[in-house]
Image (cartoon, grey):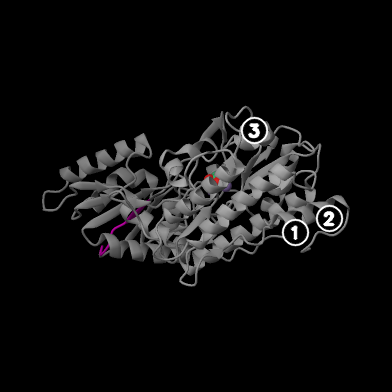
Amino acid sequence: MNREAATFDAVAEASRHREQLARLIGEDGVAVIPAALEQPRNRDVHHPFRQDSDFLYLTGFPEPEAVAVIAPGRPDGEFVLFCRPRDPKREQWDGRRAGPDGAIAGYGADQAHPLDNLDEELPKLLLGRRRVVFPLGRDEAWDRRLLEWLRRARGIARNCPTLPTAVELPQRSIHELRLIKSPAELEAMRRAAGVTVTAHRRAMQAVHPGMHEYELEAEILSIFHRHGGEAAYPTIVAGGDNACILHYVENRRRLRAGDLVLIDAGCELEGYAADITRTLPISGTFTGEQRAVYDLVLAAQLAAIDTVTPGRSFDDFHAAATRTLVQGMIDLGWLSGEADALIEDKAHHAFYPHRTGHWLGLDVHDVGLPGEGGEWRALQAGMALTVEPGLYVPPGAEGVDERWHGIGVRIEDDVVVTVDGPKVLTAGAPKEPDELESWIAAAMGGGESPGD
Ligand code: GLY
Ligand code: MN
Ligand code: MN
């Protein structure tokens, strides 16, 4: 069993995150962050549980239904956790619970209460605070609960002159912290990226004409699972023109000789996501048209990655990729005109309808404001993002010669901003076209793959 050692100390990290948050919101503020709830699938079956990322970031606590309160400067301790009580009967069916004592002993809570006491105890924690950081709008039931706690706080506030007058979304506090990854978080992301690289290399060895898209998906998921991870998002295995459907997740078709297959798959490990796309020639060699599109997308990606440095804006890498793609589309005869004007008119949207990347972290499309007041924000060391240009020519695309129809290519890597330049976490997944061809050819010939 090739299980990745769980080396990420989520509880120690969460303690550091709470200290940072406490400094940020000050003794005027209090953060109230609910855990995720279990989502029913049918009858007594639930969808696989995934903890809420803000809650995980601040607590490391894995159970559903809990509520974390971070009250900076509180004399009895800043971190109060409400959680499910111990219950041997329920635990026999549904799994172990920490209970309030376990929350203190194992998760660093200063105080812990059973959930039954939530409506009684939580309003007291709002007294003396002007602002409540709360994910308003995420869940209606929790929103109503917050209003009720605020109402109760007013009811018990006789000797307390200060009550909350504002509810703040987590965007400017928790999400700003999440945007800059700590060394331990970057290490966890590097491990998630490593498993994802292994999975894509496995796909390069397994791909062949006639196999179903879901069989290739199975190869990828087996690598994630064998390392103790899971898919960070639904895996896309899109053969031929399926690649032109951006969120194609059916994965039911057979792979055809001569087509490309676009694989967008990322592992979540220890809570952190990776997100890689590779586009492979199913028969082992690119056609001339496929290669021309591939080369162009790769050139755009490399140009974009070059701009992922401190001080450049969150838009610069998109602008770099777009400019390269548009000039290339003019050269291929897909667009006519002058690059600046075509970009201004969004002419490229016919073949490149998405942005070049997104923040990456606990969520695959991670939190973090892209800018403020109409200005894109500047990149800083410790930010992580994807760089994923693509080109997609759907069947029947107008104004483009038929020989290009049905070709879809995306190349996606995970990049960390560092003072030494862009650090590509996913560089171990081959993307040079000659290298891809030799990987696939070696596997098809039954020989060893390069790099094995
Ligand atoms: N896998 C989702 C994305 O690439 O954004
Ligand atoms: Mn992505
Ligand atoms: Mn992706």
Residue 150 covered by magenta stretch: no
Residue 189 placement, left or right of 206 = left
Q: Earlier in the sequence, mark 3 or mark 1?
A: 1
| Residue indicated by mark 3 | 401
- Seen from the viewer's position, the closer of residues 198 and 318 is 318
The kind of residue tagged 2 is: Ala
Boundaries of the magenta span:
68-74
Which of the two discs, 1 and 2, sits closer to the camera?
2
- Seen from the viewer's position, the closer of residues 316 and 292 is 292
**Quick check: marks 1 and 2 in contact, CB under 8 Å?**
no
Mark 1 vs mark 2, CA separation in Å: 26 Å
Residue 315 placement, left or right of 257 = left
- The answer to whether residue 238 of the structure is visible from this angle is yes
| Residue indicated by mark 1 | 1
Q: Earlier in the sequence, mark 2 or mark 3?
A: 3
- The answer to whether residue 77 of the structure is visible from this angle is no
Crowding near the residue tagged with mark 1, few <14, some 14–19, many ≥20 C-alpha atoms within 10 Å: few
